[in-house]
Amino acid sequence: MPFDAREDRERGHPRIRLVSGNSNRPLAEAISAYVKAPLTKGQVKRFADMEIFVEIQENVRGQDAFILQSTSFPANDNLMELLILIDALKRSSAKRITAVIPYYGYARQDRKPGPRTPISAKLVANLIERAGADRVLTLDLHAGQIQGFFDIPTDNLFAAPIFARDIQDNGGARDVVVVSPDVGGVVRARALAKRIEAPIAICDKRRERAGESEVMNVIGEVEGKRCVLIDDIVDSGGTLCNAAEALLKYGATEVSAYITHGVLSGGAVSRIQNSKLKSLVITDSILPTEAVKAARNIRVLSIAPLIGEAILRTSREESVSSLFY
């Protein structure tokens, strides 16, 4: 039975306080409905020069606060909102502040690709920690080592259970091959393949420059199979479209894709619609645009139950990792 925040309050535990930024209000409302705790009254507004102002309009002293905010486009504005929300709750004497970041922006900058370049994912971790967050809850980090950028507890959730359930509900896993669009995503592909008991394949990709990719080879048996591409982020869509073409060339009967974070910048939605992908399934970790909602071959799955359950377990000091076993 879903945990009820009101029952928790009656037992004398700190009340769950859900505080939403502006990055993805529909997701915050869905999480609120799952947790059965209302969104805390407050306002996040901008002055004429675009400075961000935050005011928490309810008492949060001594309570368990969860800030719901993706750092998606516009990344810098949403990140600044998150930091100021953390500071506002800290100065309002919240007992514990958890930054719930369904999409962790700057995650792709997790290492130095060349001399004199930053590790921006680490910088963002420092900012969140220094602002006063006590915990971080996020989803499908681009690289697992980003958890180590924080010196506070950090839970990295996975969308694989949601994807596995959707695959089973839409034709099952018969004749399915799970495909990683590059060598770096093999661990993610293997995790999904294990859940649905399917083999894996890998696209050998060569990237000449940022934002452009070319699939050179397919490692694994895909002929006569339904291919399911799995990845954490779809941005321009070029990698997915190239991978779909390569897989069909190697004899796949159809190609679908399951991607956690639908960044879909620039002309990505149009590119996906005109590609040979049967479908692209993303989550609502990033607020879907009207173009995404109208696209014929793009579907959106909600992560509200997953995030909501993780919030409840965090508040009750229960295991979060058991969600994935």
Image (cartoon, rainbow, N blue to C red):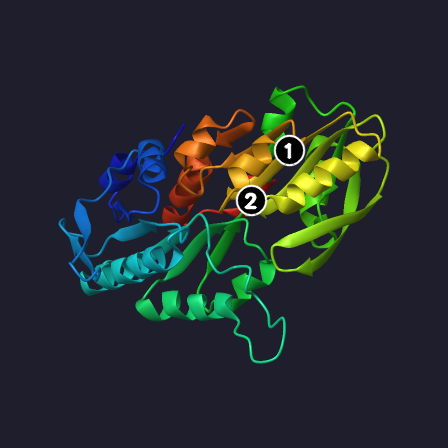
- Residue 224 marker: none
Front in this rendered view, residue 3 or 90: 90
The picture places residue 74, in percent across and down from the top left corner, at: 37, 53
Residue in view at x 70 percent, y 55 percent:
184
The picture places residue 229, in percent across and down from the top left corner, at: 68, 38
Amino acid marked by disc 1: Ser
Within 10 Å of disc 1 (Cα), the crowding (few <14, some 14-19, many 20+) is some
Within 10 Å of disc 2 (Cα), the crowding (few <14, some 14-19, many 20+) is many
Front in this rendered view, residue 264 or 256: 264
Residue in view at x 73 percent, y 50 percent:
214
Q: Locate residue 173 relative to residue 137 in the image: left or right.
A: right
Residue in view at x 17 percent, y 48 percent:
42
Task: Please report contact status of discs 2 and 1: CB closer than 8 Å, yes or no.
Answer: no
Q: Which residue is mark 1?
A: 275
Q: Locate residue 203 relative to residue 213 in the image: left or right.
A: right
Quadrant for the C terminus, please. top right
Instruction: Indicate the secondary structure of the residue bearing disc 1.
Output: loop
Q: Which residue is mark 2?
A: 158
The picture places residue 286, in percent across and down from the top left corner, at: 43, 43
Toward which corner of the image does residue 54 lie, by quadrant?
bottom left
Instruction: Indicate the secondary structure of the residue bearing disc 2.
Output: loop
Toward which corner of the image does residue 308 lie, by quadrant?
top left
Q: Earlier in the sequence, mark 2 or mark 1?
A: 2
Q: Please count the marks in the image.
A: 2
Amino acid marked by disc 2: Phe
Q: CA distance from mark 2 to mark 1?
A: 27 Å
